[in-house]
Amino acid sequence: MTNIVSSEQGWSFTWRRGRAVRDEEFTAFVAAVTPRLRRTAYLMCRDWHLAQDLTQLTLARMYASWGRIWRTANLEAYSRRVLMNAVFDQRRRRSGSEVVLADLPDRPGQESTADLHVTLMRALAALPVRDQAVVVLRHWEDHSVDTVAEILGVSVSVVKMRNMRALGRLRELLGADFAVQ
């Protein structure tokens, strides 16, 4: 009977120790990727609070499957894909017609920066959500076409087509006189 108890205690100790190591790995991963995930979420939804919620949802979903993915998956790509799925799910549930800003755009002394930000965010918001994802991942996050295709779970040709269409639409919306200073 003593051997059974001690073997169960040994298994329990080993399991807890393995879980502690996985939790430490997850904590380090969270510290490394949270700023990038939150920035990407903000570019997709234009609301820092919602971006924080989407980031937390992404990390919670990853933690739920961490025991399965922590040593085998490309965690950076996996986190971006989970985030994009959360953004797509949220967009289906909520109207995307609102543009939320932390500060009013007509503050004296910040007109050019605020106007540029508002103009870019409105133009980005006018795109379909999957086109927004391509533009954000491709041009703000500076990922390759192959990486964007992997994150979104589509083919390279779909990324190229959506990118071309989205950039063309942005040019239409911003006009020929639009210039970044």
Image (cartoon, rainbow, N blue to C red):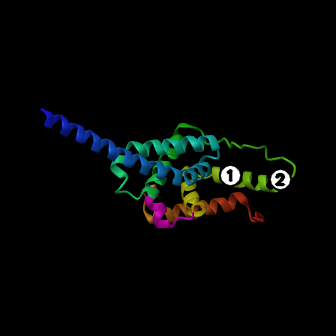
Residue 101 is left or right of residue 50, and the answer is: right
How many marks do you count on the picture?
A: 2
Label of residue 121 in the image: 1
Give the structural element (helix, strand or loop) at label 2: helix
Q: Is residue 16 magenta?
A: no
Residue range (magenta): 142-151
Rendered view: 102 above or below 36:
above
How far from the left and from the top, in percent, is residue 147? 47, 63
Nearer to the camera, 161 or 181: 181
Q: Is residue 145 magenta?
A: yes
Main secondary structure along the magenta-highlighted residues = helix
How far from the left and from the top, in percent, is residue 160? 51, 65
Rendered view: 73 above or below 94:
below
Q: Is residue 116 visible?
A: yes
Q: Is residue 91 visible?
A: no
Residue 39 is left or right of residue 146, and the answer is: right
Label of residue 52 in the image: none
Q: Please tell me how crowded label 2 is: few (under 14), some (14-19), or many (20+) other residues with Cα within 10 Å.
A: few
Indicate the amino acid at tag 2.
Answer: Glu
Mark 2 — residue? 111
Image quadrant assignment for residue 150 = bottom left
Q: Please tell me how crowded label 1 is: few (under 14), some (14-19), or many (20+) other residues with Cα within 10 Å.
A: some
